[in-house]
Amino acid sequence: MSNKTFIIAEAGVNHNGDFELAKQLIDVAVVAGVDAVKFQTWKTELLVTEDAEMAEYQKENTQVEESQFQMLKRLELSYSDFSALKAYCDSKNILFLSTPDEEQSATFLNDLQNIFKIGSGELTNTPFLRHVASFGKPIILSTGMGYLSEVEHALFTLENAGVALENITVLHATTDYPTAPEDVNLNAMNTMKDAFPGISVGYSDHTLGIEVPVAAVAMGAKVIEKHFTLDKSMLGPDHKASLEPQELKAMVDSIRNIELALGSGWKIPTATEMKNRDIVRKSLVAACEINSGEIITADMISIKRPGNGISPTRWDEIINSVAKKSYSLGDLI
């Protein structure tokens, strides 16, 4: 990945199990200018037990009394749907990604994508990590709900399974929808960067608005992932913590501006500054008439604009020196 931030628009399950709605989400992502649009792929029977409960945020956001199994089955798209969505992304010149939630779906997705995003729920799933690593493709690993030691174990597992650390990007995340600002802890992103030399870091955001992902880019995030939806008022587990189309576009534009603002890091004047230096900077100026051969004292010199004469940085060099020529009041020294 280049120095440009890799922005993933997370459609996730915000298609509500509707293939046509999924295509509309791809269209929104294209207009926003993101690098990739991402879904989630699973077979419910392989993912969850039939009596598993929904998370509290899922109950609140769906407003439906059902098991997690029932919810996921309702939101599930078929493998043929995902193949068609991949083809639709190709026709729109946007990168298709989908996060697999179990090994069978990971194997299916291996033919559709050249990057694998692993969700926070699989951070401690050692066999699954090995399975995805066996494809030999770059990996983006979310770390929500994780301890640093668990991230370390996941990286150890992926590396031992054949994925070089430079091909792994670790995303800091807080698995709560929406995430309160006080629970974000963006500094943990750079804690992981310092703890695991060789990896890139990024941020998967579940807060409301666009401030936090933009801040993450300013702090060095190389990947940003953000949920989006057609309408926050739609019923579903993730709509409430997602951006609407115009917000997604605003986030992308803000991130691209921050990338420009970060610059090279070299502390030098810009080309546009150079034309202002002589106007804004100051020079040593005669505060009175000075005759050739006189000793120049501090009370003979003032400091004024413009800056195309001797710089005040040379003050100590000029004071108590001998004037090599005569100066009138106001002359540049």
Image (cartoon, rainbow, N blue to C red):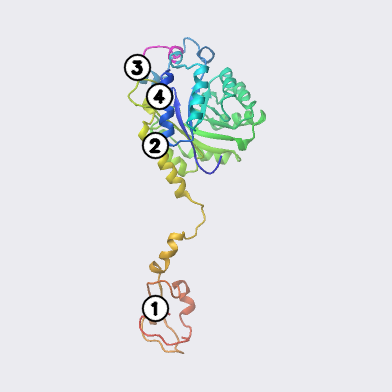
Residue shown at the point (40%, 87%) measured from the top left: 290
Q: Position of residue 55 (x, y in %)?
A: 42, 19
Residue 158 relative to residue 30: left or right: right
Q: Marks 4 and 1: in contact by CB < 8 Å?
A: no
Q: Kindly indicate whether the residue at mark 3 contacts the one at mark 2 (C-beta within 8 angstroms).
A: no
The tag earlier along the polypeptide, 3 or 4, is 3
Q: Say what secondary structure mark 1 lies in.
A: strand
Residue 96 image offset from top left, x and y in percent: 51, 28
Marks 1/4: CA–CA distance: 67 Å
SS for tag 2? helix
Residue range (magenta): 64-71
Residue at point 46%, 38% (across, down) = 186
Is 68 inside the magenta-drawn segment? yes
The front one of 295 and 242 is: 242
| Direction front: furthest residue | 91
Position of 109 compared to 64: left or right?
Answer: right
Between the C-alphas of marks 2 and 3, the distance is 29 Å
Neighbourhood count class around disc 2 (C-alpha, 10 Å): few under 14, some 14–19, many 20 upward: some
Q: Which mark is residue 154?
A: none
Which amino acid type corresponds to the residue marked 1 in the rendered image? Answer: Val
Mark 4 lies on residue: 238
- The residue indicated by pointer 3 is 63
Q: Look at label 3 and name its amino acid.
A: Gln
- Reply above or below: 315 against 258: below
Q: Are there few (<14), some (14-19), or many (20+) residues within 10 Å of tag 3?
A: few
Residue at the spot of label 2: 249
Q: Is residue 229 visible?
A: yes
Q: Is residue 177 magenta?
A: no
Q: Amino acid at mark 2?
A: Lys
Residue 308 quadrant:
bottom left
Mark toward the start of the polypeptide (2 vs 4):
4
Residue 144 in view here: no
